[in-house]
Image: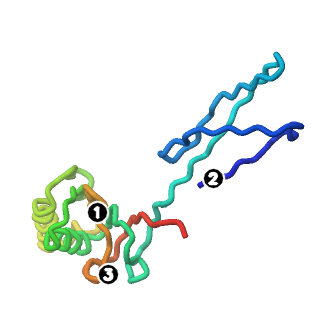
Amino acid sequence: YGDLNLTKETPPFNAVWSFTAPSDPGDYTYAVEAISNGITAKASLFVSVKSPEEDIEVNKLDLTHTGAKLLSVSTNDPTNLKMMLDIVSKLNLNADAHVKMNFGDNISFTGDKMNVKIAGLFVQKFTDILRSLPSLAALSSVNGSVKFIEPVILDSSKITAFAPLKAKFRLRVKHE
């Protein structure tokens, strides 16, 4: 959907024209040329194609999100990251994990496009190390996310599974 706005005065005649609008959202410019009685006029037609959906970010999932498409989940808490990876694995969702862990200033681990189960093992080992060396915990950090290969349509069972997480959920929802 979109709007057509005239920025100059209306011509003293009627004109009918049509074109196929692009299907991809975005802003487009078309050159328009009108010829009448040997007089040529050129102008630009600006078309803005809006998506019927928009991406939003929420901190909590609830049943109002039923039918939305889940794009990704992210957190910077090791416990929630492990839970998130376990949920994605148990629900057998097709996703890649992205994990960055820092142990103080000199040691870090980054995993990009990892298998979710393998990422879960790394996060478990990270939390085991922090538990055995509590002085390192204050100097450590973790960031992790799961990006779904195809958006996951949320139903009540998936919402219930993800609801306990303290995380950011990126959703694609339809305009109302």
Q: CA distance from mark 2 to mark 3?
A: 36 Å
* Residue underneath mark 1: 141
- Label 1 to label 2, Cα distance in Å? 45 Å
Residue 108 falls left or right of residue 118: right
Q: Amino acid at mark 3?
A: Ala
Q: Give the residue type at disc 2.
A: Gly
Is 47 displayed left or right of 159 in the figure? Answer: right
* Residue type, numbered disc 1: Ser
Report crowding for label 2: few under 14, some 14 to 19, many 20 or more residues within 10 A (C-alpha).
few
Secondary structure found at label 2: loop
Q: Quadrant of the C terminus?
A: bottom right
Residue bearing the label numbered 3: 163
Q: Earlier in the sequence, mark 1 or mark 3?
A: 1
- Relative side of 173 to 45, left or right: left
Tell me the distance, in whole angstroms, between the alpha carbons under discs 1 and 3.
Answer: 23 Å
**Residue labelled with disc 2:** 2
Quadrant of res 76: bottom left
Which label was assigned to residue 151?
none
